[in-house]
Amino acid sequence: MRSSRKMDHVQFALQTGQSGNQGLTDVKLVPNCLPDASTESVALFTTIGELNLSSPIVVNAMTGGAHETEEINRELAVAARERGLAMAVGSQMSALRDPMQESSYRIVRQMNPDGLVFANLGSEATVEQASRAVDMLRADALQIHLNVMQELIMPEGDRSFHGMLERVSRIAEGTGVPLIVKEVGFGIPLENARLLKSAGVQILDVGGSGGTNFAAIENVRRKLPLDWLNDWGMKTSVTLIEALQVYERGRVMATGGIRTSEDIVKVLTLGASAAGMAGALLKILRNEGTQALIDHIDELHHGIVLMMTALGAVRIEQLWTRPVIITGSTAEWCRARRIDLTEYACRTEAE
């Protein structure tokens, strides 16, 4: 049943953890020993497309669609409300098929009536389903998630992906809220980014590898695992740089194995507007409780402020002008893809 699968995903996500190999150790921030900044002058508000966020941290899509997951979404929504974070729910398709499951999603809006909430569906959705998902939450935006490899490994998953782009394009035109297309951990290469942009998608969430591994999770659920597919995908560092060859800064969110304040500042400096977090937050919530999660968000915000002060950037967009060196396997990938990294290393505040 779909509801039991939802809890399987939660349990296996906690068990398998995150590899941490999201490529951000390849990203080296250049120090600024003369920053014209103070911690009091730093502001953490940011924008993604036309969405205004009070924090660059987004509680990204995790779950819903089962009685047990309602508690998780409730407590995540409390933390998001208390610290002003945008929050996305997991795929709402189960609630569209079974209205009895709606409460596990609606609880997010009930607990956070004035916050930014993102609805979520897969690329199989119709415009009518997308509109219903948005209405269910009075959502401020809609995420459409792409998860081809997860579906292929999933024992009961989809096997046909014809017409994905056309459906996404129709949803972009027909829902009346900003559309975010996200990957679930395998990354979005620049060729696909171009197609999505041409289809009218305003915002990308690149969803690179290095965080929750849905290939590994689905392999745990298989009688005959396809373990050789567990490394499928692009690291978060790589897919973020590729997406930014197509989308302008201000329209890209980075997700995939982001755990620390340093990780967040690195993806912001590369050009992301926000950083989505899921598995790392879920682990704290389940193991330590809601207040511990709120305290952890405070620690993340404190660390971001310290690093932005050290870099002399008092606004998120100022990080986009700070030099950053890209090394290791991320640089090798970019060179092979003919992406010039000199621009990153030679940025100046005058830009």
Image: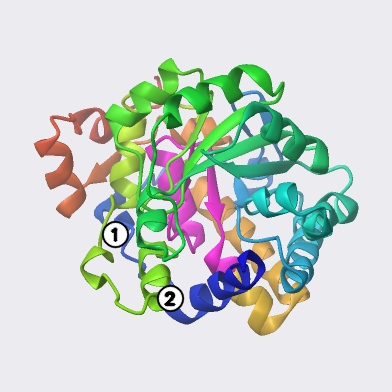
Where residue 262 is drawn, which disc sits there?
none
| 296 relative to 184, above or below | below
| 298 relative to 233, above or below | below
Q: Is residue 118 left or right of residue 307?
A: right
Q: Nearer the viewer, residue 106 or 32?
A: 106
Residue at screen point 51% across, 18% down: 200
Q: CA distance from mark 1 to mark 2?
A: 31 Å
Q: Is residue 138 left or right of residue 45?
A: right
Quadrant including the C terminus: top left
Amino acid carrying label 2: it is: Arg
Label 1: which residue? 25
Query: Where residue 231 appears, x then y in whole percent?
Result: 25, 63
Label 2: which residue? 221
Q: Nearer the viewer, mark 1 or mark 2?
A: 2
Question: What range of the chain is rendered magenta?
Answer: 252-281
> Is 279 colored magenta in this rendering?
yes
Quadrant including the N terminus: bottom right
> Is 274 colored magenta in this rendering?
yes
Amino acid carrying label 1: it is: Thr
Asked if disc 1 and disc 2 are in contact, CB closer than 8 Å, the reply is no
Query: Where residue 27 appears, x then y in whole percent?
Result: 29, 50
Residue at screen point 76% across, 49% down: 84
